[in-house]
């Protein structure tokens, strides 16, 4: 999805012009993937722009940094204030928010700790990640030949830039084979997640999602969807799932900040069809919450004004 430039980007405490928001060619993270980051959405509401679960995202970024011994030199509160100021300054009513903390330039070599931790936040206007059509009619997925990381190779619970070569390989393979997205199995062969989304299936009217020990990222949307389902009177069971569970699912959907709640209509030519009632109920509730139409969930909204 193309990025539409805005006026300013926040870099290391300063608001810089979009075209000057650049890094040196010897930035450590460019060579070795030593950065932690987040993807967050800000939605237009009747009370102005509201960022969905901003604090939870920034806390996850702090935890990702902790795993990789990368202390972020700004507090969560400072990053919240910077995000608010940036959205206002760029006069955006809704946008995607991309904070990143990465090892900058200074030394080259695999010991990163002598390099500075640079921090930036970029915002831009962004539509549906998998397309509007996908949100309405669902996507076609394929099980990737690439496995998700083993927790002792690259911790899948941390959102680290270098780890995403794994997702990119799976996404390339899926799209080049004519599918929209890839399902990723963990090294033991059980269902983990998609390249940038968590997965849910419905079987015999019950909702299932892989547990965190199956290796998915602990998604904020995954957590929100579990709470929404419970509030709608539906139980979600965290269960170790196989590809046969996908092939026989009555409904399936993938969730994430970028993909929101996207129905799945097919996996490897096993057809599910149009979005079912569980998917539609959760999708509808999710959109009403993020757009500020449900006061019960205002705790999840971080109003910019
Ligand atoms: N899995 C992966 C690998 C991701 O990159 C993302 C996006 N951050 C997700 C799942 C969904 O997480 P969230 O709902 O927090 O955006």
Image (cartoon, rainbow, N blue to C red):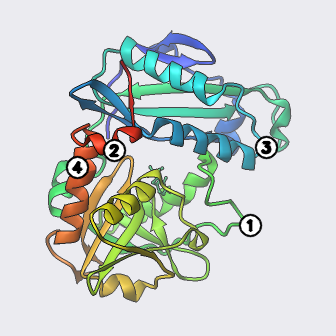
Label 3 crowd bin: few (<14), some (14–19), many (20+), radius 10 Å: few
For the point 51% across and 81% down, which residue is it?
240
The answer for how far apart the CA atoms under marks 2 and 4 are is 26 Å
The answer to whether the residues at label 3 and label 4 have Cβ atoms under 8 Å apart is: no
For the point 46% across and 82% down, which residue is it?
241
Label 3 CB less than 8 angstroms from ligand 1: no
The answer for how far apart the CA atoms under marks 1 and 4 are is 35 Å
List x then y, in percent, for residue 231. 32, 61
For the point 39% across and 47% down, which residue is it?
257
The answer to whether the residues at label 2 and label 3 have Cβ atoms under 8 Å apart is: no
Q: Which residue is mark 4?
A: 131
Is 284 situated left or right of 67 in this image? left
Q: Which residue is mark 3?
A: 69
Is 273 situated left or right of 173 in this image? left
Label 4 crowd bin: few (<14), some (14–19), many (20+), radius 10 Å: some
The answer to whether the residues at label 1 and label 2 have Cβ atoms under 8 Å apart is: no
């Amino acid at each position: 999805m193309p990025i539409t430039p805005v006026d300013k980007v926040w870099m290391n405490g300063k608001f810089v012009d979009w075209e000057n928001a650049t890094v040196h060619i010897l930035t450590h993270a460019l060579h070795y993937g030593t950065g932690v980051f987040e993807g967050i959405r800000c939605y237009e509401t009747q009370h102005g722009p509201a960022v969905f679960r901003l604090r939870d995202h920034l806390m996850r970024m702090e935890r990702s940094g902790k795993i990789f011994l990368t202390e972020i030199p700004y507090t969560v509160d400072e990053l919240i204030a910077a995000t608010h100021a940036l959205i206002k300054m760029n006069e955006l009513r809704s946008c995607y928010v991309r904070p990143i903390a990465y090892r900058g330039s200074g030394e080259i070599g695999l010991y990163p700790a002598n390099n500075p931790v640079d921090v930036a936040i970029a915002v831009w206007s962004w539509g549906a990640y998998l397309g509007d059509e996908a949100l309405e009619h669902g996507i076609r997925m394929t099980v990737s030949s690439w496995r998700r990381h083993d927790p002792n190779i690259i911790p899948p619970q941390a959102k680290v830039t270098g780890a995403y070569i794994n997702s990119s390989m799976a996404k390339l393979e899926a799209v080049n084979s004519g599918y929209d997205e890839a399902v990723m199995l963990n090294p033991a062969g059980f269902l983990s997640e998609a390249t940038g989304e968590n997965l849910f299936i419905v079987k015999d009217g019950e909702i299932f999602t892989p547990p965190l020990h199956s290796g998915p990222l602990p998604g904020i949307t995954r957590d929100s969807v579990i709470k929404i389902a419970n509030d709608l009177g539906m139980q979600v069971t965290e269960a170790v799932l196989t590809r046969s569970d996908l092939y026989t699912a009555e409904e399936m959907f993938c969730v994430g900040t970028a993909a929101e709640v996207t129905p799945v209509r097919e996996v490897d030519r096993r057809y599910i069809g149009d979005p079912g009632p569980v998917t539609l109920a959760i999708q509808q509730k999710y959109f009403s919450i993020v757009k500020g139409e449900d006061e019960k969930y205002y705790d999840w909204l971080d109003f910019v004004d």
